[in-house]
Image (cartoon, rainbow, N blue to C red):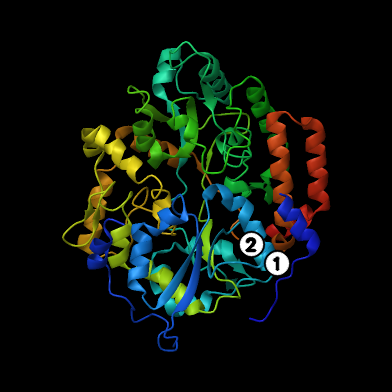
Amino acid sequence: MSAQPKFTRRQALKLMGVGTFSAYLAACAAPAGSSDMADSEMPAGEKKTISISHIGGGSVEASEKSQRMMLLRANFPDIEFENRWVSYAGYLDKIPVQIASGDLADLQFCNAFNDIPLMMENQIIIETGPLLEQFGKNILAVTPEPAWASTIYDGKQYAVTHNVYDLNNMCAHYRADWLDKLGLGLPQTIDEYGEVMRAFSHGDPDGNGQDDTYGRLLYNSVRFDDDFFHAFGVAVGHHLNGFWRDRDGRLELDWVQPGMKDALAWMSSVWADGGFHPDSISIPLGQKDNAFHAGIAGNVYSGWPSIDFAQNKIRAVAPDAVVMAGPAPEGPGGSGYTGEGWPWTFVIPITAQWPEDCVSVIDWFFTPDVASQILCEGVLGVTNKGLNENGWCVEYTPEEKAAMGDEWTQKQNEVQDINVFWGLWLTIGTLGGTQPFPTFPPDMKKHFDDMLAAKYSENALAGRDISQEYRRLTAKARPVSSEKEFWPTLQTRFGEFISQAVAGTIDIDQGWSEWLDFFEKNGGPLLTEQVNEI
């Protein structure tokens, strides 16, 4: 492709405003250079260079120490990998600047709903469909067909891979021991939810005689807290992805429905009463669970597979803590928990010199021999047991973790800098809320099925059932042409408004009118018409 980035100065200004087991790994690694690897010749003694932008690990140094990164380097000795690590907290600010400058990595991590429309508008990424057919057979074999829909433009595919792990797993977690102390049950209605938030903040649920607890720490600009919104018949959508519903035979965006204003007014009232942690709007992305894990907040909105992990973390400061999932609160608009879908992906920019190799590298991670080494949670040989005689990773059971006591905490602390998306973020994820890959041979699949069956407590499995019962998915299946021009602007403006509305820094009636006017004048009607045409 010879097209150059199409990005005006006005757009740019607007966006910018807004080591110990390496030998073990080498011994167990799969052979380098599979038969599907791109055969791009290089002069003798020279290496190809491929840069990877991702959010795994707490630093570049931590990412370099991870099992995944060491496996990658060991198995592709003819490639020099440039590790462009980005913190999860810094990702939101950095990606628009990267798009504005055209400085994307050869394998660029991004959000399909938020980032790719802008990349498409500026013509800076390449079509990947033919590359996947030739070099991505393992990727295609394990990726759910609906996952690809969000990255099809004009009938062509632009993603290298989508997350294949289950992100439709959200539910509200509570400190059940706090509820018991305060004489409260799991909230069933939105009014009861508000009562619980206020009681957690002002009822001294930890019994220390101090006013130092909160109902909940919201998640950075109110980008994720859809358990509240669904009670009013609307949703923000994770990462401000948007949420569309069928209303009288027509798809409409929840962001402009009257229920959105009602939901914001309810949240603002709880905020004014101190029910939310005051850092909620400004906290860096990725730190929403901090106050919950530290024992100073009694509620969080998160995936059900994290219930056991959260309880273990909290028990370091509150030994009798009990974490339990609860139903989505019922309100005038219904109830629900938002399923995230398959938003996380890698793309290849027009500047990539070796696109065939880029696809082949990701595809290699999806081969059974490699996936079976990296599918376990934790760091190899530290917070999981390492590899068995077959070269498949093995996790500790909840009972084994509990039996280790302080030793388990020490293990977690030892590798906590690596143990953020396991040091190299991939679209594979880890063994969790979904079954192992369909490409696994029977004995390998049974190994991981058995681990999965023993992995979760009764409370966590109850959370799974609750999450599935209340899961709600957007009715919009794929992007439309006007998104490339209008969605980034609408998304930025809406995010500003809802943060101000919840925190009470803007008159909600005035802010709502201004937002609706902005939607009308900045492509909202055209976007709606095109969504209803697909």
Indicate which disc residue 131 carries. Answer: none
Name the spot of residue 33 as percent of width and height, x first: 34, 78
Name the spot of residue 238 as percent of width and height, x first: 57, 46
Residue, disc 1: 121
Residue, disc 2: 98
Mark 2 residue type: Gln
Q: Earlier in the sequence, mark 2 or mark 1?
A: 2
Task: Determine the residue positioned at 37% across, 80% down.
Answer: 36
Residue 518 relative to residue 194: left or right: right
Q: Secondary structure at mark 1?
A: helix
Q: Nearer the viewer, residue 160 or 212?
A: 212
> What quarter of the picture does the C terminus occupy?
bottom right
> What quarter of the picture does the N terminus occupy?
bottom right
Quarter occupied by residue 122: bottom right
Q: Mark 2 touching mark 1, by CB under 8 A?
A: no
The crowding category of the residue bearing disc 2, from other C-alpha atoms within 10 Å (few below 14, some 14 to 19, many at least 20), is: some
Q: Is residue 366 among what the camera can see? A: no
Q: Nearer the viewer, residue 413 or 505?
A: 413
Quarter occupied by residue 372: bottom left
Name the spot of residue 202 as percent of width and height, x first: 54, 15
Which dot, 2 or 1, sits closer to the camera? Answer: 2
Q: Secondary structure at mark 2?
A: helix
